[in-house]
Amino acid sequence: MSSRIYSIVIDAHDPAQLARFWAAVLDYQVIFEEPTEVVVARDQSTYPGLIFVPVPESKAVKNRLHIDLNPDDRDLEVERLLALGACKVDVGQGPDVTWVVMADPEGNEFCVLRAREGGV
């Protein structure tokens, strides 16, 4: 017996706004929305999706789990993400890494990798 990832849940001050940011990043769509939950996915039957739920507290420390993006062109993707509202952040990664650490509009870190064939 094994499990599959069905969804990844992300705490947010403004779930609808953060969901729309990530939908734009991933070329996903909002497939469900109510005040207590906003779900984005490629479509109704493709998983995992991202679920955004409201929380009252602010993010306080570096995320222990984050998303890695694998674009065709890292530098072009970083520019696109900056235009969407992301920002570059320093979490101690150093100058010689091949990825760019960024944060979404609510401060959740994620990485933009240089292109990797086959998603590896």
Image (tube, grey):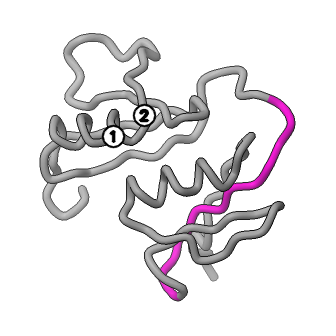
Find out whether residue 100 is within the magenta segment.
Answer: no
Q: Position of residue 108 (x, y in %)?
A: 56, 34
Residue under label 1, please give it.
81
Specify few, some or many for label 1: CA neighbours under 10 Å numbering under 14, 14-19, or 20 or more: many
Give the left or right position of residue 68, taking residue 16 as reference.
Answer: left
Give the left or right position of residue 13, taking residue 99 as reference.
Answer: right
Q: Position of residue 71 (x, y in %)?
A: 22, 51
Find out whether residue 46 is within the magenta segment.
Answer: yes
* Secondary structure found at label 1: helix
Q: Quadrant of the C terminus?
A: bottom left
Residue plotted at (86% across, 36% down): 56
Residue 73 higher or lower than 111, as above or below = below
Disc 1 and disc 2 in contact, CB within 8 angstroms: yes
Q: Position of residue 87 (x, y in %)?
A: 41, 26
Q: Which residues are magenta?
A: 45-57
Quadrant hosting residue 86: top left
Q: Earlier in the sequence, mark 1 or mark 2?
A: 1
How many numbered marks, from 0 up? 2
Q: Mark 1 to mark 2: distance in Å?
A: 5 Å
Residue under label 2, please give it.
86
Hey, which residue is sitting farthest bottom in the picture?
45
**Type of residue at label 1?**
Leu
Residue plotted at (74% across, 40% down): 13
**Viewer-proximal residue among 115 and 29:** 29
**Viewer-proximal residue among 94 and 83:** 83
Residue plotted at (52% across, 88% down): 45
Hey, which residue is sitting farthest right in the picture?
56
Quadrant hosting residue 24: bottom left
What mark, if any, has residue 41 been given in the picture? none
* Secondary structure found at label 2: loop
Q: Quadrant of the N terminus?
A: bottom right
**Type of residue at label 2?**
Ala
